Amino acid sequence: PPPSGPSAPPAAPASGSGSAPGGRFVARAAAATAVLTAAGSFFGLVRDQTIAHLFGAGSDTDAFLVSWTIPEFASTILIEDAMALVLVPAFSLALSRRAASRTAGKPGSGTLAEDPAGNAADPVRALLAATLPRLLLALACAAAAVALLAPLLVGALAPGLADPGLAVDCTRLTAVTVLGFGTAGYFSAALRAHRSFVPPAAIYCVYNIAIVAVVLGLHARWGVRAAAFGVAAGSLAMVLVQLPAFWRRLPVRARRAVRAVRGRRVIRGRRTARAPRAAALVGWGLVAPVAVFALSRQSQVLVERFLASGLPPGAISHLNYAQKIAQLPMTFSLLLCTVTFPLVARAMADGRTERARRRVERDLVLAATVVLLGAAYVIAYAPQIVQLLFERGAFDAGDTAATASVMRVYATGLLGHCLAGALVRPFFATARPVWYPAGAMAVGLLLTVAAGALAAPRWGVHGIAAANAAGITTTALLLLCGLRTRVLPVRVRAVAAGLGRLALA
């Protein structure tokens, strides 16, 4: 803990500080994140409006949306889920160890403890050196593999597609997002762990602005391929908007100081303790459960598009537009959880379980309140919302009616989506691997597949959307029941009763 008493300096929520940020900091961070996320959502609607206006909801947009499966998959895994769930706790633990190392140095110096060779042992820089270069190499190889295997991917994702050649071209363009999103996700996780929230919250603004600019400039020449190229350009813009803040918070220094951490001893008074390897903070034992969970969750989109590819043209597009609008309330409901996740991870790294429990319970109630209000609004005004946002140009009244009816079905699963996103965070905020969320998500995915396969032939896109809602709601219930026994002593009955009253209201 930081020194206390009249002569102690005031605690501030600076990076590496062991102090807990106050309510004002959380409020400011949440407000800034909310404003920038709202701006990103607004530009996302402008993006979707632009694509709908120029290309409508037909075979061309179906081909583009199949190629957009790769960016959507990469975004969820590399920005929102796996990357954040692995790296935020890892950087939080490294920051906690840095703070402990500073207390082991000379009193009042504020410097890190040194190893016998006289080198500063900084766990944060060691983690950066051990993970970022390898990640960039892996992402570049994955992007190249996606571009090379684009025909096979399109055939597997949408075997009934009317124009697979166009989808292959678009997929090769969007393959760049694997590198762009992965790098942006790494930067976002590192910055949020350092309590810097503005640059990560701005990434979707620049992403959507880049897509709109490229589509408007190239659609006449490239057709719907311009949208795919815009997606690739937007992913690189995500990296550039965070690069200055990342460089300030985690500047690259001499290799000697970083390498000194590995395998050396950190002086702690008269005792010495071997410093853990930085790579152990993100070892495969921790990454695997998160990756499996994220892949299973995003696979719901793959299931939807696979089942919808055999339906009449436009089915994939109607599902896409309905899902994008219906999930806006979920996005805003999880803003507070995004801000508080680094705080929960840091509290758990410091052993302050009770503080983490209170924070998680408050977040669940607030997130559920926001998402249920949004779901009620979507169900009540679905046709008006779709008409206002999309009915122009090639997107006609028939597309509005189809999209609105699917949107109402999607809205029934919004509470499940919100709770799944909020509940999984404390599971992965610990220093040990937890496989329970992956198992819970696998159960929900199996239910989605089975229900969707049975319902799609009879009820079409509505059956697919209902299967999605049933699967994610099942996952959320399993996560809520398993949280107390495996991670935090959350009062499950009290939380469930509060959520039930909110849903009934």
Image: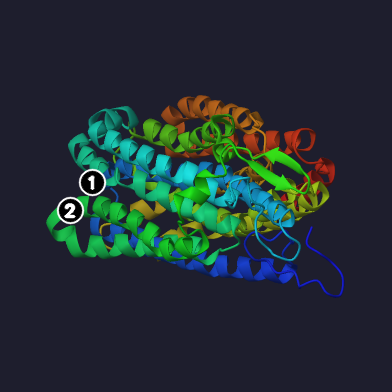
From the viewer's perspective, is 352 left or right of 468?
right
Q: Is residue 405 visible?
A: no
Spot occupied by residue 318 in the image (x, y as percentages of width and height): 38, 47
Who's the residue at 38% across and 64% down the image? 206
Spot occupied by residue 341 in the image (x, y as percentages of width and height): 65, 52
For this orientation, the residue located farthest to the left is 221
Image quarter (top left, top right, bottom left or bottom right) of the C terminus: bottom right
User: What secondary structure is marked by label 2?
Assistant: loop
- Foreground: 20 or 364? 20
Q: What type is the residue that disc 2 sits on?
A: Gly
For this orientation, the residue located farthest to the bottom is 6
User: What secondary structure is marked by label 1?
Assistant: helix
Q: Is residue 39 visible?
A: yes
How far is the residue under mark 2 from the one under mark 1? Answer: 9 Å
Q: How is the image coloured?
A: rainbow
Residue 373 position (above or below residue 69): below
| Pointer 2 with pointer 1, Cβ within 8 A | yes
Spot occupied by residue 286 in the image (x, y as percentages of width and height): 59, 33
From the viewer's perspective, is 183 left or right of 213?
right
Q: What type is the residue that disc 1 sits on?
A: Asp
Looking at the rendered image, the disc whose residue lies closer to the viewer, 2 or 1, is: 2
Count residues near mark 1 (Cα–Cα under 10 Å), then give few for <14, some for 14-19, many for 20+: many
Q: Which residue is mark 1?
A: 60
Spot occupied by residue 249 in the image (x, y as percentages of width and height): 52, 62
Residue 132 position (above or below residue 437): below
Who's the residue at 57% across and 57% down the image? 192
- Foreground: 342 or 156? 342
Count residues near mark 2 (Cα–Cα under 10 Å), then give few for <14, some for 14-19, many for 20+: some
Q: Which residue is mark 2?
A: 223
Who's the residue at 52% across and 51% down the image? 257
Count of numbered tags: 2
Who's the residue at 75% across and 54% down the image? 359
